[in-house]
Amino acid sequence: METNYSISAIIVAYNEELLIENIILQLRNQEYDGDLEIILADGGSNDNTVELAKKENILISTSAKGKANQMNAAVKIASGDIIFFVHADMTLDKNTISTINKHIKDGYNGGGFANEFDENNEKIKRLGNWFNFRILDKREQSDKGIFYGDNGIFVEKSVFQKLNGFKEIPIMEDYDFSLRLNQDHSTIKIRNPIILVSSRRHIKAGFLKTRLQWVIIRKLYKLGISPFTLVKWYKDVR
């Protein structure tokens, strides 16, 4: 029987005490025969996130707040051949990990998943099409190999290290990483199963505002505006 890859699932979190146990349970309930390691990449939570994770007997990585910092720090203690970055507010299909394993075996170096929002999905996706002028061509960024955190990025650890991980910037670290990953490596967008992501930012900050922010921030980043400036317009909603 062919050996499955060892996979490290890294949960990127800050003040997620309401969700952390659920995402750990989802990972533990994956239908996967290989080794699956679960790591919390915490950014200095001041609630019970870390304490709850410790009770679940998973590895804990702590670093300064910032997804890039947190993910890079967690990878340093990860033992898996494959790294899978997860957000605490995601809902995962039971075959998510096995599907990653299959596509890495097929020769891909990394990628991400198609996603849907847990509430108001059609409205949010429609706004995204409008603001990105996707009238005839409905392809999303992920269809072009650009993956964000909500796509559940996965990558071979050796490739991650070769690329020197995420650039430690406060925003757009996933966009930057995807661009570099796609330059010399093979990636795939997994369409089935999908990842269900929370629409809490849209609900709390406003649908129009949130979608427009995403478009403007990406365009300004591409024009060379510092991510340290851009992050001031994208506040944490928790």
Image (cartoon, rainbow, N blue to C red):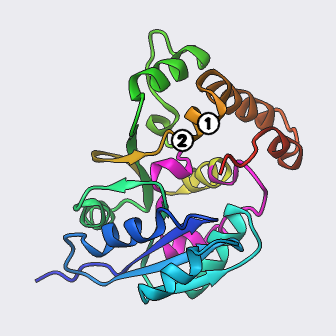
Residue 118 at what x, y percent from top left? 39, 39
Residue 65 at what x, y percent from top left? 74, 67
Give the residue at x 33% y 62%.
107
Residue type at mark 1 is Lys
Q: Is residue 102 left or right of residue 142?
A: left
Tally of numbered tags: 2
Residue type at mark 2 is Arg
The residue that disc 2 covers is: 200
Above or below 209: residue 227: below
Cβ–Cβ below 8 Å for labels 1 and 2? Answer: yes
Question: Which numbered tag is attached to residue 224?
Answer: none
- Residue extending farthest left: 1
Give the residue at x 39% y 41%.
115
Asked if the stretch drawn in magenta spans residue 42, the answer is no
The range drawn in magenta is 146-174
- Residue 232's image quarter? top right
Give the residue at x 26% y 56%.
93
Q: Is residue 9 left or right of residue 60?
A: left
Name the residue nearer the viewer: 8 or 88.
88
Residue 140 at what x, y percent from top left? 48, 30
- Residue 122's image quarter? top left
Distance of label 1 from label 2 (alpha carbons): 6 Å
Position of the N terminus by quadrant: bottom left
Mark 2 surroundings: few (<14), some (14-19) or many (≥20) residues within 10 A: some
Give the residue at x 50% y 72%.
10
Residue 83 at what x, y percent from top left? 47, 71
Q: Secondary structure at mark 2?
A: helix
Name the residue nearer the viewer: 125 or 75.
125
- Residue extending farthest top: 135
The residue that disc 1 covers is: 204
